[in-house]
Image (tube, grey):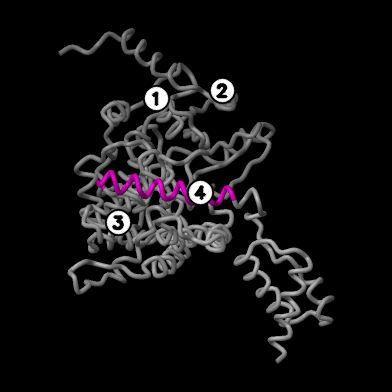
Amino acid sequence: MSAPPADLVRSQQNALVDLVAIPPVAEELAARFEAAGHRLYLVGGWVRDALLDRSSDGDADFTTDARPEAVLALLEGWADTVWDTGIAFGTVGARRHGVTVEITTFRADAYDRVSRNPVVRFGETIAEDLVRRDFSVNAMAVELTGERSFVDPHGGLAALHAGVLDTPASPEESFADDPLRMLRAARFVGQLGLTPAPRVVAAMTAMAGELARITRERVQAELTKLVLGAYPRRGIELLVDTGLAEFVLPEVPAMRLAVDEHMQHKDVYTHSLVVMEQAIERETDGPDLVLRLAALLHDIGKPDTRRKEADGRVSFHHHEVVGAKMTRRRLRELRYPKSVVDEVSQLVFLHLRFHGYSGGEWTDSAVRRYVTDAGPLLDRLHKLVRSDCTTRNKRRAAALQRSYDGLEARIAALREQEELDAIRPDLDGNAIMEILGIPAGPRVGKAYKHLLALRMERGPLSREEAEAELRRWAAETDA
C-alpha cells in the first residue's frame, strides 16, 4: 500500500492541531523559543484532555531541545515567577498571568530502580522524550515552533479512541523506572474510564510490590485523584485485582473475606463499592472526597468483628467503632490532612446510628444527639446512610428510605424550634461561675457538661429553669 500524499498528511495534522486549544502563554513562549532557534512542544495531559474535549485544570507542560540554562534565560523578563528546584532533572517552572508552566528539556534517562532517582541524560529528539512517558495517551505533543504539527509516535490518539490505556515502551520497563505509574494507571482508569491493556494489567500484578518504594505522600496524591474521578469504582477494582491495594488500602480487599449479613451481596467489598457509587449519585456540589472515602471505608471494620451466631447468621457487632479506628489509622498513614482524617472517621463511626430509628420511636433528645454528634457532617451523613441501603428487596428499601425521610422531617421540625446546629447549655461558663460563686476550674466544666446533657434531654430551658437545675446539681454534688 502506498503512503498517503504529503498534502493529505499535512491536512490531517492541521486538523488535529486545531483540536488542541493552545493557551496564550504557550503562544508567547513559542515565539520566544523560536526566535532563539529552539523547538518547543506542548505535551502530556493538556493535549490528551483537549482531544477528549475535556477541560484541563492542570499545569501546561512543555518539552524542548533547549538545555535548562537556556530555558532560564528565555524566561527572564517574561515570567512573573520562576523556580528552578527541578533544574537538576531538566525541569524549570514558571508562572505568568496566573498560569503555571513546566518546561523540561528532552530526556532520555536511565533509572537505578532502587531509589527511583534517574541518571539524568538529556535527549536530542522529541521521539526520545515521548518514549519515556508513562502512557501512550500522555505521549502526544503539539509542536508550537515552526510549522505546527501533531506528534504521536506511540498511537496515543488511537488508544484514546479505543479507550485503552497502554505504555509507549514495555510496561515492565516503564513501571520499573517509576512504580508510581502503576497507581497512575488505576487513576487514569478512575478518571477517564480507560481500560488497561492486558499487558499493563499483567505487569501491575507481577510488580505490585514495587509500589513499596514510593513515598506515602505521592501514593496519597494519586489515590485522591482516583477517588475523585468519574469512575472511581473501576480504579479501585483495578487496584484490588492486581494486588496494588495491599500497598495502598489493604482494608478494602480484606472486605472480600466477609459475607454480608443480609446475604444479598457477594461480599462486603462489593457492597461498599455500590455504596460509594450511590453516594456519588447524591453529590450536589461536585466530587466530595470525604463522602466518597467514607462510603468506600464505612464497613472496613467488618472482617475484624465477624461472628457466626447460634442461628447461623453472621454478625458484625460494633464494626462501626472498629472501622472508625482503622480508618483513622489508615488515612493518617497515607498522610491525609487532619480534617479529612477526622471527618471520614467520624462518618464511619456514625453510619449505623440511624438504624436504631425504625418506627420513629426516638425521643427529641435522641434526635438532638444525632444532629449534634454529626455537627457540620450532617448533610454528608444523610447521604451516606441513604446510600448504605443496597438491598434488592424493594419493599424493605422503600421502608428504610421512608424511615429516614421521617428522621429528616423530625430534624427539620426541631431546627425550626431550636438552634440544633449549635446546641449549647442554657448557661455559659461565666454565668455558672457567677451563680455558684466559684472560680474557673474543673467544677465549672462538670457543671457545663451537666447542663449540656440536660439541654439535650429536655430542649431549651428558661433562665430560671436553668439556674434552678444548676443549683440542684451543685447541692447534690456537694452533699
Of circles 4 and 1, the one toward us is 4
Task: Compare marks 2 and 1 and give the one earlier in the sequence.
Answer: 2
Q: Which residue range is magenta in the image?
A: 392-413
Q: CA distance from mark 3 to mark 2?
A: 41 Å
Q: Amino acid at mark 2?
A: Glu
The mark found on residue 51 in the picture is 1
- Proximity of marks 3 and 2: CB atoms separated by less than 8 Å: no
Residue 395 in the magenta stretch? The answer is yes
Q: Give the percent coordinates (x, y) of residue 87.
A: 54, 47
Q: CA distance from mark 4 to mark 3?
A: 40 Å
Considering the whole magenta stretch, tell me its main secondary structure: helix
Rendered image quadrant of residue 230: top left
Q: Is residue 216 visible?
A: no
Residue for badge 3: 244
The mark found on residue 27 in the picture is 2
Task: Compare marks 1 and 3 and give the one earlier in the sequence.
Answer: 1
Of circles 4 and 3, the one toward us is 4
Residue for badge 4: 408
